[in-house]
Image: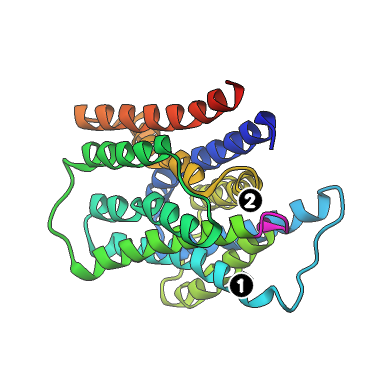
């Protein structure tokens, strides 16, 4: 694979993380039940991805019966990532949930090594350690004793996210976007009962926020992730995704005026440095 293809994949993953990072802000702007938010944005994402698939040039790979079990597993993993994380945030401290979910890069590196034989290089192991340190700084002020059930669900969310990424990478020669599309269908179905249990307030403000999240925050992000994972090893993709929780408080600060603390700034700097170095070093190695 050429450096150009790899950088294109890294750029797609970065833009995906950029869209993902706006979720914290927009979820706070919508006064709906969390499962309603998760289901509504996934439903819009399904429509967006179907339209994108129809408009995209070239031959669309068809899903065979042999692929259905694996695609279903991957779809369930990604749906579990979203649903478990939403529930975890209602049962434990938000910082606990994010820290435990973002152990995902470590799980992804181990699963990718075991199942795909993509052994992480030394700079990626170093970046994983730096990401962990940075995450500790970012959320150290908010860490607290939480619900064991909530913490376990957040941990399960991270493992499911890692498993989904490994399966997508394994199907890089197929069409990973179809897998993500299926996962959004599952999420929308799981959220359906909440439309009757907690009827949403259909204001213009709420609907515009949900539309943004469905089209861009997870719709376009899914398409970008599916594109990037074809070109980028699992460990590197998950390291780049670690910028999501760093950017989350940035958007909140810019829109809502909440100032980040010094540990957040220090931790964010460590994570960004780890992402940049682990991205640049492989390219320099190939040129030498």
What main secondary structure does the magenta stretch of the protein show? Answer: loop
Which quadrant would residue 156 be assigned to in this image?
bottom left
Mark 1 residue element? helix
Which quadrant would residue 174 be assigned to in this image?
bottom right
Across and down, in percent, residue 214 comes to 58, 53
**The N terminus lies in quadrant:** top right
Residue 172 on the magenta span: yes
> Can residue 259 be seen by looking at this rendering?
no
- In screen coordinates, is 62 left or right of 164? right
Which quadrant would residue 108 be assigned to in this image?
bottom left
Across and down, in percent, residue 13 comes to 56, 41
- Image point (71%, 77%), residue name: 66
Q: Nearer the viewer, residue 106 or 118?
A: 118
> Height in image: 226 above or below 38?
above
- Image point (75%, 51%), residue name: 52
> Can residue 104 be seen by looking at this rendering?
yes
The residue singled out by tag 1 in the image is: 70
> Height in image: 167 above or below 199?
above
- Label placed on residue 226: 2
Please give the range of residues in magenta: 171-177
Q: CA distance from mark 2 to mark 1?
A: 16 Å
- Which tag is nearer the camera, tag 2 or tag 1? 1
Mark 2 residue element? helix
Across and down, in percent, residue 39 comes to 51, 65
Across and down, in percent, residue 56 comes to 81, 48
Residue 3 on the magenta span: no
């Amino acid at each position: 694979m050429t450096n150009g293809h790899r950088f294109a994949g890294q750029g797609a993953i970065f833009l995906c993380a950029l869209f993902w990072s706006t979720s914290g802000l927009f979820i706070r702007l919508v006064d709906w039940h969390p499962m309603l938010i998760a289901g509504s944005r996934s439903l819009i994402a399904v429509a967006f991805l179907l339209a994108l698939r129809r408009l995209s040039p070239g031959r669309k790979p068809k899903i065979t019966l042999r692929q259905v079990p694996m695609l279903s597993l991957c779809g369930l993993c990604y749906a579990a990532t979203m649903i478990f994380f939403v529930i975890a945030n209602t049962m434990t401290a938000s910082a606990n949930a994010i820290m435990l979910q973002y152990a995902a890069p470590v799980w992804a590196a181990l699963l990718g090594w075991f199942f795909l034989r993509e052994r992480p290089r030394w700079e990626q192991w170093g970046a994983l350690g730096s990401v962990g340190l940075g995450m500790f700084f970012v959320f150290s002020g908010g860490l607290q004793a939480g619900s064991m059930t909530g913490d376990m669900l957040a941990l399960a969310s991270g493992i499911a996210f890692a498993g989904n990424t490994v399966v997508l990478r394994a199907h890089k020669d197929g069409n990973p976007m179809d897998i993500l599309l299926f996962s959004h269908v599952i999420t929308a179905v799981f959220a359906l009962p909440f439309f009757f249990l907690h009827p949403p307030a259909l204001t213009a403000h709420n609907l515009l926020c949900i539309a943004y999240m469905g089209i861009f925050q997870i719709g376009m992000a899914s398409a970008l992730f599916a594109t990037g994972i074809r070109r980028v090893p699992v460990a590197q993709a998950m390291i780049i995704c670690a910028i999501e929780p760093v950017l989350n408080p940035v958007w909140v600060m810019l829109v809502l005026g909440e100032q980040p603390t010094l540990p957040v700034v220090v931790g964010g700097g460590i994570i960004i440095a780890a992402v940049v170095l682990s991205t640049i070093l492989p390219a320099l190695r190939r040129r030498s």
